[in-house]
Image (cartoon, rainbow, N blue to C red):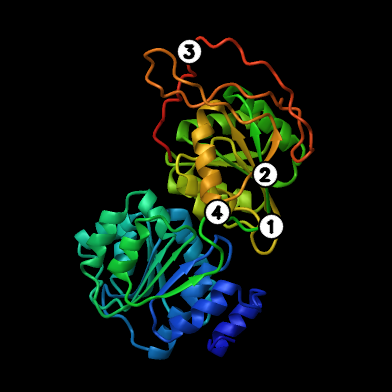
Amino acid sequence: MLGLPPRLLTNLADLNITDPTPIQSQAIPHALNGRDVMGLAQTGTGKTAAFGLPIVTTIMRDQTRPGPKQVHGLILAPTRELAKQIVDNLRAYAANTPVKIGLVTGGNSINGQINRLAKGTDLLVATPGRLIDLMEQKAVRLDATRFLVLDEADQMLDLGFIHALRQIARVLPKERQTMLFSATMPKQMAEIASAYLTDPVRIEVTPPGKPVERIEQSVHFVEQKAKTPLLVHHLDLHRTEAALVFARTKHGAEKLKRHLEDKGFAAGSIHGNKSQGQRDRALKAFREGELTVLVATDVAARGIDIPSVRYVYNYDLPNVADNYVHRIGRTARAGRDGTAIAYCSAEEMGEFKAIVKVMGREIAVASGEAWEPVKPAGRGNGRGRGGRPGGGGHGAKHGGGHKPAHAKPAAAKGRPRRQRRAKAA
């Protein structure tokens, strides 16, 4: 299949992977031929195998062992969770082969990572910040690196890793194979592609910004203070099914998790204030069904690969519209169906419109009516972003076809106050 060696095909069969996904069937042959690849595909479509299998195959055939501190293949990921997910998949694909796969991320002992890197690594998965720490300590050498993969490159831009990428690129050999994979294609990606890739094959499986069709999406236009009871109501409808809830801030995520626990839900949280050990334990408990609700910030959105996730709730809409696509991509994985429910307050109407524009499609309204923009009055600064909607209480069931109540707007004493943007993650 696709020119892969028998050992890898046996491993894939043991993992019940027998038919390649579209991104795999298109990318793997080009990658095996040494071409640079730019792959645009949604999360959950098998991108890790699309870049990982050809690299493992080439390393197996070459049989050249890395020298001390050397790395033959480098895969950069924006978050610890995603990096660990990639490593887990690659080690399963490469089981019973001599290919040595390593992981370096923040939140773990750097001394242990230095010791492991000292022996040389065939394929290293890393987050940019920790890799630069190791480079500065001269614990890793990239002068013999023949493969570079930038996974979820768009989120690397969102998280401000562009300068780190440039610093890493300066020490890589010019003669190398580079692959870039992303779910969306922001304008700055063209700069990344031209700087890192040479005459790449462009493979576009799903149009950038378009969620997989198996996800049923809806939005509730609801006041901020009514979001929590609405979420509790929705979660009550499927207490035994896995649900992922996205909040904008670390404090908000933790507060919401505690409230859900008080309501009797088996809930956990992952965000930037949690140690790596705490995040790993929460993900493990969620994966194994000990937790049925996981509250997260965008920092961990792309590292959650749990096929059992049936529901994704956007409790707060993301500041970056593309992140909505990545959030809802946590459901409908491995060929399953999924449901994505968004709550939009008056202050978030701008974010909602940006999401609709990025996706190029409308989102079904489950309750309430779109918030009306507030017109500036007198000498105001004109920064108001939304007015009152036509209602939509938290008793409406998702997808129930219920008509929103038409409530009269309250007499305005001024524009709604904009929510203060707390530092996310």
Q: Residue at x 33, y 84 (%)?
A: 65
Q: Position of residue 382 (x, y in %)?
A: 41, 22
| Residue nearest the observer in this picture, 163 or 87 | 163
Q: Position of residue 68 (x, y in %)?
A: 26, 76
Instruction: Answer with mark 1 or mark 2, whichever residue precedes in sequence.
Output: 1
> Is residue 163 visible in the rendered structure shown here?
yes
Q: Which quarter of the image is occupied by the N terminus?
A: bottom right
**Amino acid found under the numbered disc labelled 3:** Gly
Disc 1/disc 4 C-alpha distance (Å) = 18 Å
Residue at numbered disc 4: 304
Disc 3/disc 1 C-alpha distance (Å) = 42 Å
* Crowd class of label 2 (few under 14; some 14 to 19; many from 20; radius 10 Å): many
Residue at numbered disc 3: 414
- Asked whether the residues under the numbered discs 4 and 3 touch, taking CB atoms below 8 Å apart as contact, a structural biologist would say no
- Asked whether the residues under the numbered discs 2 and 4 touch, taking CB atoms below 8 Å apart as contact, a structural biologist would say no
Residue at numbered disc 2: 292
**Amino acid found under the numbered disc labelled 2:** Thr
